[in-house]
Amino acid sequence: MPARKPRPTSPRIAPVTEPSDLQRELMFGNDASDSLNISATLAHNTRVLKRFSQFGGGLLFRGVLPVRERELVILRVGANCQSVYEFGQHTLIGREAGLTDDEIHQLTLAPEKGGWSDADRDLVALADELCADDCVSDATWARLAGRWDDAALVELLAVAGFYRLVSGFLNSAGVQLDPGVPSWPEGAFEH
């Protein structure tokens, strides 16, 4: 895991605060709660926000992967990309999915520092290899293919790729943490 890199400390693209009717519909849907900063930032381009929400929502709410394993991959991608927003949001989701705070912290460390099962270690390797080289190694692929069917393998690649895109957007646009969302765990990225 690389050392932490500096990221914008303020928004480069300010979230929309007075949305149009279309922006409001896309940002909130049927939920009248506060919009997330990511949605309010994406709302500057409603075409992108709509497609982004459809694809991301499909992976989050209608996928074939078990939620814990999906979140393990998302959190590891967020750590690799050093996206505090991504990591913070999915820390909350990961906890609900059964990841412990210790496991979440371990996702910010070198893979050998975690006490991962073989199955989890392979998911960490998938995220690491895709973030480092845009390709899963033959050895990791063989182990994953021994555990997952083709539909799940496609989804694992899509989840890792989508959340790498999300992390790059969040980092580059300077999207700030939403209220109540945790930052990095103490000791993150220590070698």
Image: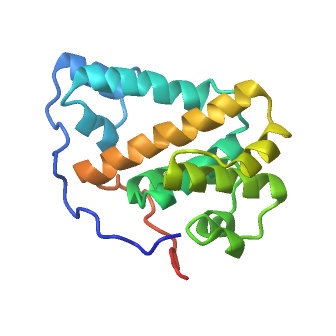
Residue 3, by quadrant, is: bottom left
Q: How is the image coloured?
A: rainbow
Residue 180 on image: x %, y %: 41, 57
Residue drawn at point x = 45 percent, y = 62 percent: 182
Front one among 81 and 105: 81
Decide: is 2 above or below 182: below
Farthest residue to the bottom: give it. 191
Residue 45 on image: x %, y %: 21, 26
Residue 60 on image: x %, y %: 57, 32
Residue 25, by quadrant, is: top left
> 102 left or right of 149?
left
Check the picture and name the quadrant holding the C terminus: bottom right
Number of numbered markers: 0
Residue drawn at point x = 46 percent, y = 68 percent: 184
Residue 37, by quadrant, is: top left
Front one among 46 and 130: 130
Residue 72 on image: x %, y %: 64, 51
Decide: is 2 above or below 176: below
Residue drawn at point x = 34 percent, y = 27 percent: 28
Residue drawn at point x = 60 percent, y = 69 percent: 105
Task: Let me know if residue 25 appears in the view.
Answer: yes
Farthest residue to the right: give it. 146
Front one among 15 and 47: 47
Task: Let me know if residue 31 appears in the view.
Answer: no
Farthest residue to the top: give it. 22
> 89 left or right of 127?
left
